[in-house]
Image (cartoon, rainbow, N blue to C red):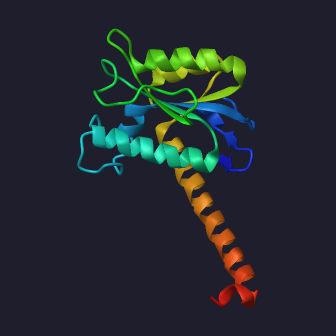
Amino acid sequence: MCFRRVGFAFSPGAANGYDAYMALMRILVDGYSLLHNWPELAPGHPRHSERARNELIHVLTRYHDAAGIPVTIFFDGAGAPAGVPKPEPALAVEVLFSHAGQTADQMIERAAHRFNAYGEVLVVTDDRAERDVVSGMGGSVVSCANFILMIGSALTELQDELRSRNRTERTRFNRHPQHNSK
């Protein structure tokens, strides 16, 4: 697996036979599939709980901040629970709940098909049927385990970059004694 923060390049390997660098325009996440594969998020809380969903949203927001790629998280359910704000298209991390009579998988497949005309879309799920449908449409897919590794790499890289910049600025600031006398 390959990940580069600047310009974001990703190589999903054998996941769908596509092994070239690509620029992603959006990541579509099967929320409950990812939660079931990430027990470290909201430990001790049910995977379908509000607490687990909020923790996932928080982590994916941090991931977006590091990678700069818009993320849409899809959850199964009869609409959004009370108190969940309506999605705003300008948000970098969008959260959608399926309505009665539809599944999150159907929403993801439709979104992947529609977004494909605008650029590369990456679908995150461990649902084999969904992966087959999306890759059959020409979309890219990645397993939840590999995506969790991508998130870890991106957040670690961002933290390392921030440490390096802070160290550089501290050194630069300390070279000018007039700034230190206050």
Question: Looking at the rendering, which quadrant does residue 162 occupy?
Answer: bottom right
Instruction: Pick whichever, 167 or 103, lies toward us.
Output: 167
Percent x, y for residue 26? 62, 31
Residue 136 can be seen in this image: no
Number of labelled discs?
A: 0
Horizontal side, residue 181 vs residue 21: left or right: left
Q: Can residue 155 be seen?
A: yes
Q: Is residue 74 above or below residue 175?
A: above
Coordinates of residue 57 in the picture (x, y in percent):
43, 41
Residue at image location 66% in from the left, 64% down from the top? 161
Residue at left 57%, top 44%? 64
Location of residue 89 in the rendering, given as x and y in whole percent from the top left corner: 55, 26
As drawn, is 171 to the left or to the right of 92? right
Q: Residue at x 74, y 45 (%)?
A: 7
Residue that lies at the very extreme toward the front in this rendered image: 182
* Foreground residue among 175 and 43: 175
Q: Identify whether 153 is placed above or below 72.
A: below
Q: Position of residue 153 (x, y in %)?
A: 58, 54
In this rendering, the answer to whether 42 lies above or below 115 is: below
In the image, taking residue 182 as reference, residue 105 lies left or right, namely left
